[in-house]
Amino acid sequence: MHTGFEIYLKENMQLSDDEIRLIYSFADERKVRRKQVLLQEGGVCRFKIFVCKGLLRTYRTREDGTEHIVQFSPENFWVTEPDSLHNDTPSRYYIDVVEDSEIMFWTKNDFNLLFAQIPRLKYFTERLISRNVTLGRDRIFSAISATPEEKYDEFVQTYPTVFARVPLHMIASYLGLSLKTLSRVRHAQLKR
């Protein structure tokens, strides 16, 4: 069992050792390589992923090939494409690996079986969904109202460990800024 995952479960859900073993028994543990695509646009998402080590990203592309990153998922983050997973519809998003990572994943059916046996897991998942909806709304508000400097500060606060791990063009994509604007803001922030 991955120690970080066990600690995460104990800290966030107060589960018994038996419940942790049950959750782990349904998991598929994998090491994935940088640039590996876990979900492609048009594919149907059939899993929930927990990042034990490493970094994933979720993004969408425009017709001209421009990428727009909607989420980074470092250690102790969950990632899925919920609309595709719950409705069995083609995804509009990609999920790929930014740096070599260790992940655990569960199928939708396995998670449903776990929900029936561990009610606290279902409650915790509902809290995560609610938190993610709130974060999504906050992100939309920031995208339409914040200055580039405020967006940069929010990114550093939200993803303190990610900033040094990804190229600037990915941060610019996440923030909805040009690379030139991000470089200017970053330079000004470093001077402070």
Image (tube, rainbow, N blue to C red):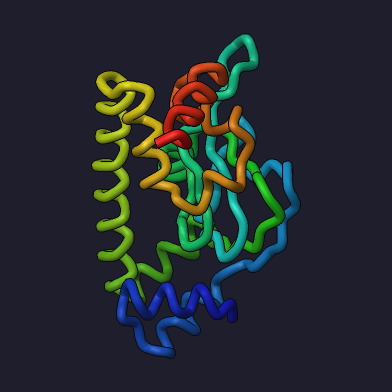
Residue 26 relative to residue 34: left or right: left
Q: Residue at x 49, y 84 (%)?
A: 21
Specify the quadrant of the image occupied by residue 101. Answer: bottom right
Q: Residue at x 27, y 57 (%)?
A: 126
Residue 178 percent location from the top left of the image: 52, 17
Observer-nearest of 125 and 69: 69
The quadrant of the rendering that contains the C terminus is: top left
**In this rendering, is residue 17 above or below 63?**
below
> Which residue sits furthest bottom?
17
Observer-nearest of 48 and 86: 48
Q: Residue at x 64, y 42 (%)?
A: 96
Q: Is residue 100 in view?
A: yes
Observer-nearest of 120 and 58: 58
Residue 191 percent location from the top left of the image: 45, 34
Specify the quadrant of the image occupied by residue 175. Answer: top left
Residue 150 relative to residue 101: left or right: left
**In this rendering, is residue 99 above or below 42?**
below
Q: Residue at x 29, y 42 (%)?
A: 135
Residue 108 percent location from the top left of the image: 48, 56
**In this rendering, is residue 47 above or below 192?**
below
Residue 144 percent location from the top left of the image: 29, 19
